[in-house]
Amino acid sequence: MTRINERIRVPEVRLIDDEGNQVGVLKIADALNFAHERDLDLVEVAPEARPPVCRVLDYSKYKYEQAQKQKQARKHQQQVTIREIKFRPKIAQHDYDTKKSHVERFLRHKDKVKITIMFRGREVTHPERGTAILERLAAELAEFGVVEQHPTQEGRNMTMLMAPSKAVLAGRADAAASSGEAANGARGAADAQVKLDGAAADGAAGGTSPGAVGDTPPPTGATPPASSPVA
């Protein structure tokens, strides 16, 4: 939108008043007077039209409202970060688990993750090994991420792009994980209590009671043990 003043000359404009009503086609001087009488500005909203379309409004207020809208739009925009994790086709299980935990952590933080399989030497003749690793990773992390770009190979590298799942973006994945940890903790406490109760029961059953072995009289005819001499 462009504000029109006395120095800008166009023959005539189609005017819209401050309430959005069509006024009609007016000479530019008449349109300016119409705006000035209401202490408002004449703003060109459709310069490509013939004649140009102008509207009567408070230009300063309009600019302020537009700035606020842009500010709110930027506030709600989420900056997307792409992380990269590299695998080898013959990766050991321990290294695989470590790198998978990194991918999960990035996805939980709502970052996209580029997973790269690096082939060396004759490994490039077996791309199915890289595909198997990527498909396994996607399946195991399905709760936290979705495959945005399926495995593609360029030269000696095979890549796949994963993005956070809807559950992660909505915050449901962390809540589910916390609930699972709490449930596991409760089950562990219950198991521990059961073990303690079992141990207590075993101790009660195996302990000596009055009239137990130590107090049982020797069988009839048995020779009582000799008493120790008194010094």
Image (spheres, grey):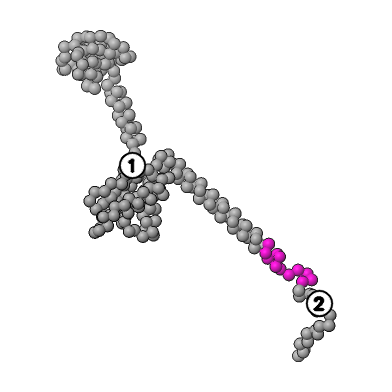
Does residue 86 appear anywhere in the picture? no
Secondary element at image label 1: strand
Mark on residue 176? none
Name the amino acid type tagged 2: Pro
- Give the quadrant of the N terminus: top left
Camera-nearest residue between 59 and 95: 95
Residue 37 to residue 93: above or below: above
Camera-nearest residue between 3 and 149: 149
Q: Distance between the residues labelled 1 and 2?
A: 84 Å
Left or right placement of residue 10 versus residue 15 in this view: left
Residue 75 to residue 184: above or below: above
Q: Residue at x 78, y 69 (%)?
A: 210
The spot of residue 97 in percent (x, y) is 39, 56
Left or right placement of residue 66 versus residue 184 in this view: left
Question: Which residue is tagged 1?
Answer: 148
The spot of residue 104 in percent (x, y) is 39, 49
Secondary element at image label 2: loop
Camera-nearest residue between 169 and 125: 125
Left or right placement of residue 221 versus residue 168 in this view: right
Category of crowding for the residue at label 2, using alpha-carbon neighbours closer than 10 angstroms: few (below 14), some (14–19), many (at least 20): few
Residue 9, located in which quarter of the rendered image?
top left
Range covered by the magenta-colored residues: 201-212
1 or 2: mark nearer the eye: 1
Q: Residue at x 42, y 39 (%)?
A: 170
The spot of residue 98 in percent (x, y) is 38, 56
Q: Residue at x 27, y 16 (%)?
A: 56
Left or right placement of residue 164 versus residue 63 in this view: right
Question: Which residue is tagged 2?
Answer: 217
Camera-nearest residue between 37 and 87: 87
Q: Residue at x 77, y 89 (%)?
A: 229
